[in-house]
Each structure stands twice: as structure tokens, then as C-alpha cells.
Amino acid sequence: MRRVPRVIDASTALLTDHYEITMLQAALRSGTAHRRAVFEVFARRLPDGRRYGVVAGTGRLLDAVENFRFGPDELASLAKAGIDRPTIDWLADYRFTGSVDGYAEGETYVPNSPLLTVEASFAEAVLLETLVLSILNFDSAVAAAASRMTCASSGRPCIEMGSRRAHEQAAVAAARAAYVAGFAATSNLEAARRHGIPSTGTSAHAFTLLHDTEEQAFAAQVAALGPGTTLLVDTYDVAQGVRNAVAAAGRALGAVRLDSGDLVTQARETRALLDELGADQTRIIVTSDLDEYAIAGLAAAPVDGYGVGTSLVTGSGAPTAGLVYKLVAREDSSGELRPVEKRSLNKTSRGGRKWAARRYGDDGHTSEEVVGIGYDVPAGETGRPLLVPLVRGGEVVGREPLADARDRHARSLAELPVEAHALSRGEPALPTTFE
Amino acid sequence: MRRVPRVIDASTALLTDHYEITMLQAALRSGTAHRRAVFEVFARRLPDGRRYGVVAGTGRLLDAVENFRFGPDELASLAKAGIDRPTIDWLADYRFTGSVDGYAEGETYVPNSPLLTVEASFAEAVLLETLVLSILNFDSAVAAAASRMTCASSGRPCIEMGSRRAHEQAAVAAARAAYVAGFAATSNLEAARRHGIPSTGTSAHAFTLLHDTEEQAFAAQVAALGPGTTLLVDTYDVAQGVRNAVAAAGRALGAVRLDSGDLVTQARETRALLDELGADQTRIIVTSDLDEYAIAGLAAAPVDGYGVGTSLVTGSGAPTAGLVYKLVAREDSSGELRPVEKRSLNKTSRGGRKWAARRYGDDGHTSEEVVGIGYDVPAGETGRPLLVPLVRGGEVVGREPLADARDRHARSLAELPVEAHALSRGEPALPTTFE
């Protein structure tokens, strides 16, 4: 794959739960730290009624793994937290030297899909648990919501504008995940810089209120941004706002934005008024607490684009993907790699390192996910293999441009059975067969 | 207040929505950019049935405002996004020179509480919208959930362990917000380093599975971490796990952790077994998808501490506080500061710069929040003033140790009417009177 530069270079080593370091300390002491181990990331279930999940954050994760190094600051902090000297010395030299395979970014998934496999010594692999899960859980939650929204919008562009309703760095990741799942643009400037996502935005109610009249505000905006700008018309009275907008920008007015009230009615009235005023090319953008259901509800309204905020960045009811990172195999005292699984009530896991493939039905759609034990998809398996190499011998080999993940998501989604696109609650889009 | 060092020094200037920069561009051109303006942060409502909110993130916000500077990288990115030269030149010299007042961190709030007031030129103040909201919305959402959990735990310690279910940087902020709202510790190592919060953790199921037997795993952990450690006893069979734990650590075993199944029953059985084995000082820590209701449901069970993850970092059903940043006053063309308010359907705001105070009833509890227009609480107002100076002339004056916010929250919560502590859905704990 092409070489793409890394984005952030700060150490990620302390974005970790304390228990990973104490486990390391105990395993170093007991001599088990160097046992070869396989950890697997999977979802036990999808959020309430969802039909598929979307892998996102993989590119960010590869950067974060490369930056998982303990410098003097990090080590001093661990010493202060009571970690012993041998462990700190071991961490000073830490770099991940193992391998990571995973579903490529943008791929859809179902429960028990083996989304990521980390194989290394126990010591090396156990340390990555929290970082892996933080990134994949957040980004995948946003991407899953975004994917439903872009399905519901039937080709009309969706714009991500939820930064204000998410942690300031999570906002950047949310914009990225939404882009993977088909959003057209973001309001977030750091996402534009860091990830090359198109950014967009024009004005808020505050800009109108700043001026003595709406007419003055619109004139100022058009003077600075040209008639192709988007004017926000609902600060006072919508119909008057639309008249003022067309008066300010002329029939070349790019768009008007509606941010309150009943959007279906307002969009219809606004469309009629714009047409009456000769602004028949002016688009109507709607915002205001949209989610996938509201977007679907606007399908028959004359709307040209959706700005989505809160619901997107909070995963539309599922703010985390609920992925877990579980030990599924490890070397035993005789040096053999053996499957392991816990038997805790309501939280079982399935042992063994796994391959996965997606089979196709006669209609060209995927029909089934097949999962088996082993490193490679068996000869004769006709399904599309799902795991790709991401890290080999500690070196990142799976970095790719963000556009590739976006394209992959579109393909993977289009291949799912058509029921997958339904917004209603249902079963996972694909059954999983364990071979 | 005491001087406390800043935590992160990277520029925060692009953690911003594109439209803030286009508004600036238009206002610079129309000559309105330098009008004095007052923006206010408030909640239109509390999340579904909640009785109070909790201000959190203020300390992080003050750091972020100091780091809101546009360097060559940020400016180049804006030029690429189409921002014009005069705006970029203006931003190159940007620093916030205005004033910020706010409810102090940890304070409780109700709808329409004027939580933060930013007064500066329109240009300076409009740019802070997204950053202010991102920080306060996320941190306050987590703190509000955390506060309900610490109420429900009736003095038993709550430990934050949700990092894996939140964006990796949001996780650090979540640990901080939870600490403000009464959590005793966090699993997040970066929160320990960055904010000085006690961190804690011992082991996961993977550590047990790494070893050939549970006995070997427990022996290894006790050898490394001492008998006072917490042993996770539900990897295989809980009762056998408890026996193995006491066999490994003796009666001095610090704690056992239960992470699955019906926790009420398991806690009772485990307590009985520990007592029978003579480990009557050994504590029982429970984890496993706890929220405030599950914690309350364990009140009568012999549990000594709660580890809380997903539900905490996702705000227990309300992952964002829903705070907004609205222009409430601005200078007009004659130079006078005038209240402004939009009249959008279902999204009105109340114009004017505000003071706020909390009045007390005869029982010593707060009885009412009073809000009025003006810079200062009027002479004769007996209520406790709620807004404190945070920034003056661009200089941070409101930085404080995190422990102060934590103490303040405990006081503010104790002062609310007792109904505020109910977990059931209800009205806001205090009525608001506009004077």
C-alpha cells in the first residue's frame, strides 16, 4: 500500500488502563510475560436493533501504535503510580514488534466478526488493549450512525457539524469517521487539516444578530463570501428571511439554511417562495437535531442537504460500539499456542486465532459471514477474505489514504442484503457460521 | 486564586467550526467585527428527567483558551480552505483579550442558568464557540452522570474505568470530570499524570487465561503486587475462584472483583464464602456495565466499591450536555450595548448579560435560582452569587486545583433540595426566577 504520513506524534503510551501495567509487572515476575499471545477485537452484539456495524479508526490506530513509546515523562509517572523498577526498565525499551491483522477500515461487520487480531508476546499485546478499544469503539460508533444517515439521505449530501457536542479531539475523529461512512464534508477545521476532509460553513444566528437588521447581515455576508453562500434565514421570520436573502444575493443565491421548527413544512414553503422569487437553483439545507429517522422523514421534502450534529457524534443512541479485546490463544508452558476462553456468565468468548470471509449469494449480495480457526482462509473457500495485514514485525504495512476506506465502505454496504439498509430494528444483516 | 500550571500546549485554534471563520471574514469586511459582544452558555433543558446538571471542564477550557493561537500551520490550512488574506492576517495576531465569567467548576445548574459569559469584540468571542461547547458539553455530561452514580453509591467508592469506551483523549477528560463529581479514582494513566487523579487497577481475565491454571495466575499476581491486591475471581467458576484467591493471598487478601452474572446474588455468596474462609476484611469490588440504577440496586448487597465504565463515559444516556453558546448582547451602530435574542421557533434565547444567584430556604437547602440582567448581583440580593471571574483582559484569573472543583461539587450538591438526589425522572431541582 502507499505510504501516507502520520498525523500526530505525541506519545500514546499512557492512554492506557492502569491494570495493563500491573498485569505486565506480575507476568514479568512470573515468567509468563513472554508467552506468545493472540488478542481479538470483536462485538458480542450490535447496538439495539442495528443490522450492521462499520469498522472505523484503523488509520488512527496505526498511528497510535507507532507512537506507543514510553519516554522519561511517562516512566516517571508510572513510578509515581507504584510500578516497580523491572517493569519500568522493560517499558523504557518497549516497542511493538508483533503483527496486527484486521478488517480493513470502512468494512461492515456483524456480531462475532474477528475485527482485529493482535499477535505478539503477552507483554507487548496486553498493553495495547485500551488504546485499541478507545479508538475503534468511538470511531466505529460514529461511522455506524453516519452510515445509516447517508443511507437515509438517498444521495443528498450530509454534512458533519457535531463538533460542539463532542470532546474537542473526539470531534476531529468523529468528522473522520463520518467521512469514511459517506458524509460529504465537515464543519471541523482540524479534521480538514489533519485528514484532508472538505470543510464547510457560512454563518450562525449570532452573525445576523450582530447586525442592526437581517438585511444588513445578509448584505455583509454576500459581500464577503459571494452570492453562492448559504444564508441562515430563520433568525426572525423565515418567509421574510428568504425574501431578504434573495434580495441580498439575487437569483444566484447558493443556498438557504433552516435550523428550527417543522422542517418538512418549512422546506416546502421555502421552496415555493424561492421558486416564486426566481431563485429556483437555490438549494435548501436543513439542520436542527437531525438523526437518521428525521433525515428519512424529509425524503419527500424539497431538501438538498442535511447538516447533522449531536446525533452523529453521539452515535445516534449508541455512543460506543461496545467492542472488546480478549485473549483467545496463548503459548502454554510447553511452548504450544493453545486456544483459551473465559467462562464468565453472560460474557463468554470463543478461543483460537480466526480467519473470516464473506460469502456471496446468487443475487450478488453477500449472504453469510464465515469464521474459522486458523491463520489463513482455507483453500477452496470462495468467500471474500476479510482480514488484511496491518502491522508486520512491528512495522505498519496497512496504512492507506482515507478515500480508500470511504470507497470500501460504500462497496461493503452496497453488497449487504437490502434489508441491511432498513432503519427499523432488526437482526444482523448477515448470519455468522463458525466452521 | 493559586497559580496552577497548564497541562497541554498544542494550539487549539482549529478545534473550531468553519463558519466561525467565515463569520469573522464577513464581519471584518462589514466593519461589525469590532462591536463589543456578549455570548452566553446555557442549557435550554436538562437531559430527559434529570434534576440538575454539573459544570465541568472549566479548568480544561481555560488552558484551551490560552492555547487558542493561530500559528503558520493553522493559517496555511485556513488559506487552503478559502479564507481571505485580511482575515488570515487578523488571525495571525489573534489572542483573546476579553473577559470570561462562569459558574465555577463543580457547581450544579438548572435550565437557563447563565453558565458562562464571554465578553469581547464579536470577532474575538465568536471564534471560541466550538471550543467552549466541546469542552463543557462533554465534561459536564460525564460529570452529571458521575454525580448521580456517587449519590447512588451512598459513600462506597466509585472507580472510573471507562477509557476503552470513549475516544482516547475524551477518556482522559472523562476521568477528570468523574473525579470532580466524586469518583475516588480512575483506571486511566494519562489522567493520573495530567490531572493528578489517583489511578488504580490490577488485572483482567486475560491475565488468568495467560496462565495454565487460575491458581498459578493468582500466585503470580500476589507475588508481584502483594496480598493486598484485587483478584478477579469470575474467569471460570466464582466460588472456586474465591477459594483459589484466599489460598493464594491468605486472609490478608485486599479484594476480589466480580465482573459478570447477577451481581447481587454473587456478592452475597462471595461475602459468605470469604467470611467462611476467614477473609472477613477482604473487600468485594463489582464491575460489569454498571450505571446509577445498577449501583442503587446493589445498595443492600455486601459490596465495597463499584467500577464504572461505559455508562459513565457516555453520560448514562445523555452523552452531551446540550449546552449552547448564544449572542445575548452586542454594541449597536451608536456604540451602545443592546440585548439581542433570536426568535427561531423552538429555539429562543433570552437577551442581555446576566447575573445569577442561588437563594436558600429556611431548611438550609437552596430553594431557587435567581437570574437578572446586569453585570453584578444587585445590592440586597441575599442569594449566593454564582458567576466568578475566569478571564480578565485575556489573562486567566480563575485557574484552581482540581480538588477545589471536587469540594465545590460536593457542597453544591449537598445544598440542593433532597429531591435532587432521586434517580427517578423529575423536574429540575430548583425553579429559576427571572428578575
Image (tube, coloured by chain):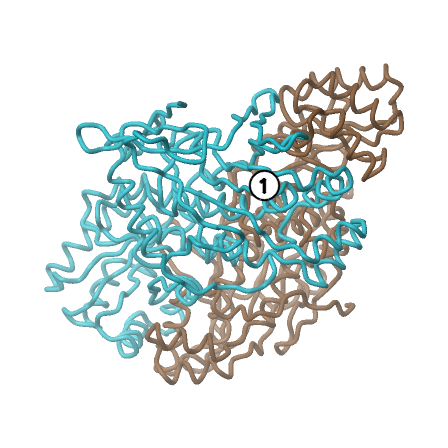
Chain colours: A cyan, B brown
- A57 or B414: nearer the eye? A57
Which residue is at a point 36% across and 68% down the rendered structure image? Answer: A208
- A232 or B385: nearer the eye? A232
Q: Quadrant of the N terminus of chain A?
A: bottom left
**Residues packed near mark 1 inside 10 Å, few (<14), some (14 to 19) or many (20 plus):** some
Residue A197 in the image: state x and y as whole percent: 36, 62
In the rendered structure, the residue with mark 1 lies on which chain?
A: B
- B117 or A224: nearer the eye? A224
Residue A374 in the image: state x and y as whole percent: 45, 31
Which residue is at a point 76% across and 37% down the rendered structure image? Answer: A30
Q: What residue does disc 1 label?
A: B428
- B389 or A333: nearer the eye? A333
Residue B344 is left or right of residue A272, and the answer is right
Residue B423 seen in this snapshot = no
Q: Quadrant of the C terminus of chain A?
A: top left
Q: Quadrant of residue B20?
A: bottom left
Q: Secondary structure at mark 1?
A: loop
Q: Quadrant of residue B292?
A: top right
Residue B56 is left or right of residue A213, and the answer is right
Residue A107 is left or right of residue A172, and the answer is left
Residue A59 seen in this snapshot = yes
- Say above or below: A297 vs A64: above
Which residue is at a point 78% across and 49% down the rendered structure image? Answer: A83
Q: How many marks?
A: 1
Q: Quadrant of residue B81?
A: bottom left
Residue A32 in the image: state x and y as whole percent: 70, 37
- Amino acid type, mark 1: Pro
- Say above or below: B145 vs B189: above
Which residue is at a point 62% across and 22% down the rendered structure image? Answer: A344
Residue B230 in the image: state x and y as whole percent: 77, 33
